[in-house]
Image: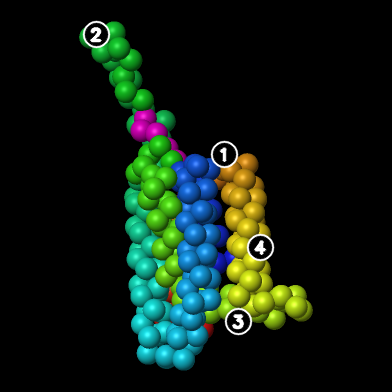
Amino acid sequence: MTPGPDLVMITNLVLHGSLRVATAAALGMITAGAVQAGLGAAGLAALLAASPGLFAAFRWAGAVVLLGWAVLALRRATGRAGAEAPAPSPQATVTVPAHPTGEPPAGPPPSGRAAGKAGPSVRQAFWQGLLCTGSNPKVGIFLMAFLPQFVPAGMAPETGVPLLAACYLALGLLWLLTWMRLVHRLAPHLRSPRVLRIADSLTAAVFGLFAVRLALGG
């Protein structure tokens, strides 16, 4: 539940899309966590921990995914910077004659979210969330290393670990839903072209840093 790529993606989706889209991504992340927990319980986490080469391959694959999202966010940021034209000076103001049909002239292009490309669909957001969490092999290893020590005395590990994993993932979903509601409340003040450009730049930086960290095994 610490800040990371998941939280950055959720924030970005709320600003560029909607609560519905961000919720779909959150469900994808929790689904990926559940799959990793299940695979870890089945022994995959132990296999990755015991096979440095296989673990490194998974890490590099996850780093490539994060780096790809960093590039996309950077392209959005640079695109917004190019689209922000300076306001015309009073001397350059020209009176536009009325259209012969009586229709008003076309207004300025929309700014903010309407001026950019359409955000991902609900299905695309779900798969993005699934890939964001699922591409990090450390999730399953962390769950299998962290949860068994909290299994109550007298409870079988094969029962206690899945139960604790379900509680952990439920808390994770609650945290993501709470965060996206907070961002949604602040969104009207954060959707100016300048703020969105800064948000995209920060998203690119965070995804890039986590990609390098994952690739280096940090």
Q: Which mark is residue 101?
A: 2
| Residue topped by disc 4 | 167
Q: Is residue 41 visible?
A: yes
Between 25 and 11, the one nearer to me in the picture: 25
Q: Is residue 47 magenta?
A: no
Give the foreground label among 4 and 1.
Answer: 4
* Place of residue 34 in the rendered image (x, y in percent of width and height, measured from the top left): 52, 64
- Find numbered disc 2 in the image and state the secondary structure of the residue it sits on: loop
In this view, the residue in front, 135 or 32, is 32
Numbered circle sitting on residue 171: none
Residue where numbered disc 1 is placed: 188
* Category of crowding for the residue at label 1, using alpha-carbon neighbours closer than 10 angstroms: few (below 14), some (14–19), many (at least 20): few
Residue topped by disc 3: 145
* Label 1 – label 2 distance at C-alpha: 36 Å
- Disc 4 or 2, which lies upstream in sequence? 2
Asked whether residue 67 appears in the rendered view, the answer is no
Q: Amino acid at mark 3?
A: Ala
Residue closest to the far left = 100
105 relative position to 214: left or right? left
Q: Which residues are magenta?
A: 108-112
